[in-house]
Image (cartoon, coloured by chain):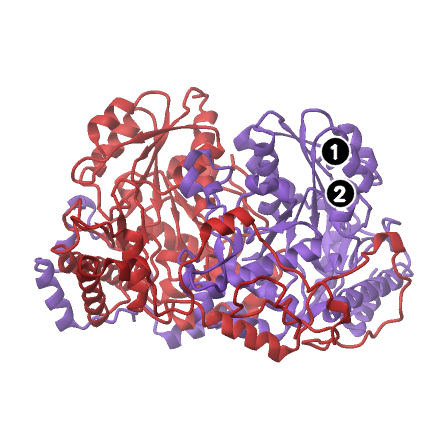
Chain colours: A red, B purple
Amino acid sequence: MADISTALDAIIVEPTVFELSSPGRTGTTMPAADVPAADSLPEHLLRSELPLPELAEVDVVRHFTRLSQFNYSVDEGFYPLGSCTMKYNPKINEDTCRLPGFLFTHPLQPIETVQGNLALMFELQEWLKEISGFAGVTLQPAAGAQGEFSGVLMMAAYHKMRGDTKRVKMLIPDAAHGTNPASVGMLGMQVVTIPSDERGNVNLEALKAACDDTVVGMMLTNPNTLGLFDEHVEEVIRLVKDCGGLMYGDGANLNALLGIVRPGDLGFDVMHFNLHKTFAVPHGGGGPGSGPVGVSERLLDFLPNPLVGIIEEGDEEEDLAPLYGFVTPKHSIGRMKAFHGHFGGGLVRAYTYIAMHGPDGLKDIAQHAVLNANYLQAKLRGTYRIPFDRICMHEFVAEGRFEGSDVRALDISKRLIDYKFHPPTNYFPLIVPEALMIEPTETENKDTLDRFVEAMLKIAEEAQSDPELLKSAPHTTRFGRMDEVKAARELILCCWLPENYESLT
Amino acid sequence: MTYIPISPAEREAMLETVGVKSLDALFEAIPAAHRFPKLNLPPALSEMEAAAHLADLASTNENAREHLISFLGAGAYHHYTPAVVDHILRRGEFYTAYTPYQPEISQGTLQAIFEYQSLMSALTGMDVSNASHYDGATAAAEAMNLAYAQFRGKRKKVVLSPFLNPQYREVIGTYAQAAGIELVGADAQTDLEATPESFAELIDEDTMLVVVQYPDFFGRIYDYQKLAEAARAKGALFCIVANPTALITLKTPADMGADIVVGEAQPFGIPLWFGGPYLGFFTTKKAYIHKMAGRLVGETVDSRGQRSYVLTLTAREQHIKRERATSNICTNQGLLALAAAVYVSTLGKSGLQKVADLCYQKAHYAASELSKLDGFSLRFDAPFFHEFALTCPKPAEEVNQYLLDHGILGGYALGKDYPALKNDLLVAVTEMNSREEIDALVETLKEMN
């Protein structure tokens, strides 16, 4: 192994692949060339060196296995990360998405040779329409944020097509996800923040005051990031529509609504789905996601290009399947990414998941996600302040602070790690001080929830009796708190082979 | 069948704790007229039925492993992935974790991404890599966002090579319309023999970015050094969209003077998967990192003096900057960045060189044999790596149909994007294509009338 003592003064828990490298090692054998050798490229087009690591297969397996053991995951335990819907990811989905027929099809194959893929995509478009109440769905956006960007582009294109050029304002509640204003910022629109009222709903008076003929529309997360369903949602939508605006729904919290209510029925014009939240596509340590978008009738022609459609009708009596292919919406905003969306890792898994649930199973998901959240809220309410305290949906927000104590939400979160739980989302939404945003999902049993409650109550006690214990947490993990300031100041963003690498043996 | 682990008795107890009588009673805030819609969806399948149904759908496809000999590339490539890669990806510790917001319990993901960043920097020769973007096309669009931010919106023009992948040009176009950016150069009617130097005249004081592809969409290899210098002379940034397999062999984009190097890292251990999810890599110079979108992992120490890793420079991102953020990017392709890191580590320097060499040798053998056929010729003289344009004696669409009837995916018909190339096929050859397959392609075309 390379000499790594020079890398840093810090203790090295697991060397990098560069440090594990040794000249001449290889992890795989490729076949010999079976064709006559061609002339090589001119020297001036070739690179002079390739400073990449050399490891044996066993080195690679042990290295990445050790790394994996430094992670906390849903497969290991409870992960109540608010807004992220960290539900259990069924194992069958891992198998279906790796069927050779899916793995080894090229995105540019003739459509006649990929009818299985196209049928799956077409059916998934139809299912998502039915689940959400929208008139059309695109599967192309790569993630929720890109779905949002697509949605906002369609809203802008709709007004532009109508010659309604003075619309520049997007209304966004103060509880919104940061991606909402960022998406709007990408189009140079102006963000108008709408405050929440004392019950966590959109403040109707403020909304009325903001609604005029310069409004593009409103981006509403419902249930919102407090986990609350807006009690006046129909009034909110009416106000926005009356001033000529369009209604965007952030689908991040759709898990609460499956079989409960369809955003399209409420009057939303556009919404993105997060297949990696609601439909159990695994998060993969931060991606890939998958962010299809549903739209109402009036935005249909603006959907990204292409969609999957039926090119030739089938005939059920003759047992003849339709021919699926790609179609272009009339006034499409264009292409969001190369090819057709996150097919294998996103669409196949989500399709499998929906197929295994059916209409009743989907409703069960939402009901139990909401039950679990309300159960935790009921158990924690006496100890942690719930600023907007009513029946919540799939998540709720508590304050991570106590009277007469300087313990913060961050400390509570880090201490939870010692009790073998992943912490809730911290410091979001911004409208709740020291926010702890807790989303249990439907895939946790009562025992797990009870153990979590017990830990939270114990931590509340510790905050009084031994606050240092929280501030220096976690104690039981392989790694302690990180020096984030040092990381940002020194900006060490990559590593290399050791300096004397070539001379090592 | 569902994955809900709550028994009826537990449910009753929990409802009582909450203080409601039934599950339905939890939903009174929802407008009654729209509450509990009846969803018209097929009834639930058992796992056994779902597995069979999905296998049935998958087998309706013809694929490059079981049915077809494939020479199709044009942005997605069929390469061999060592078994190790998927075994690592299948570890629940990796794929069921979220974005590493809690670094104490996410060091696995963080170090893996740090290693991915390092490998991509070493490959491109650039200073820094981010944690990845959705795909090569959106990474190219993010290069435009970086340039836009770098010039604070004061420069409005992007010069696109007409030989940049047409889908990438479309995606850049989608992103450009949002910010009111003007795109020039991407003309399908262009002179197909135009050298990179000839684009220099399009670059002016209003140009924020020049984007070229390496090798270009037709597989041609050009040294972009002079064009990079021309861009720099006007103060514009220079972006190279590169194929990572080709970079194993070719002069690095950094050596040509690129400011930003992006591309599609799907060839590094990620299946074709009908187009996604793939892995957009994004590398740049240190000077531009504050304008770069996407997650970034940096090295630090923990409270016990151990080397460790965290997400850093997060102040650039949407959750802090909100509408002033340069991009709304939230997720990256974390799991696929891990795939690329495992792929590169497993093949290592010599294995990668072997793969690149096999691609090169086989593509050149194929080109040489094909161009011997009557009526067939190589469209361009420029050096190429593993992809080349083949002029056929009849429309490429017809040639493809004929080949498909013989179990061969011939290549990408270029006439869709370049009307002058109606008879041209873009043929990709990788280490997956045996000599027998290449000979079969040649023999089949020989017999075509």
For the N terminus of chain A, give its image quadrant.
Answer: bottom right
Q: Residue at x 49, y 72 (%)?
A: B90
Using the image as rendered, state which of residue B90 and residue A232 is in the foreground: B90
Q: Which residue is mark 1?
A: B232
Q: Establish if B430 lies above or below A236.
A: below
Mark 1 and mark 2 lie on one chain; the one further toward the N terminus is 1
Camera sees residue B55? yes
Residue A203 vertical position relative to residue A141 in the rendered view, above or below: above
In terms of secondary structure, where does tag 1 sit? helix
Residue B66 pos. (x, y %): 63, 73
Given the image, what chain letter belongs to the residue carrying mark 2?
Answer: B
At a point 81% along the width and 72% down the height, the residue shown is: B435
Q: What is the chain letter for disc 1? A: B
Is A30 left or right of A390, judged from the image as shown? Answer: right
Which residue is at a point 13% across and 72% down the rendered structure image?
B9
Residue B257: which disc? Answer: 2
Near mark 1 (Cα within 10 A), the count class, few <14, some 14-19 or many ≥20, is some
The Cα–Cα distance between marks 1 and 2, rounded to whole angstroms, is: 9 Å
Indicate the position of residue B72 as horizontal and vertical percent values. Answer: 70, 59
> A206 left or right of A25?
left
- Check chain identity for marks 1 and 2: say if they share one: yes
Instruction: Looking at the picture, tell me which residue is in the foreground, A293 or A185.
Output: A185
Q: Position of residue B289 (x, y in %)?
A: 58, 43
Q: Position of residue A245 (x, y in %)?
A: 34, 28
* Residue A398 located left or right of residue B253: left
In contact (CB < 8 Å): disc 1 and disc 2: yes
The answer to which image quadrant residue B278 occupies is bottom right
Kind of residue at badge 1: Arg
Q: Is residue A309 visible?
A: no
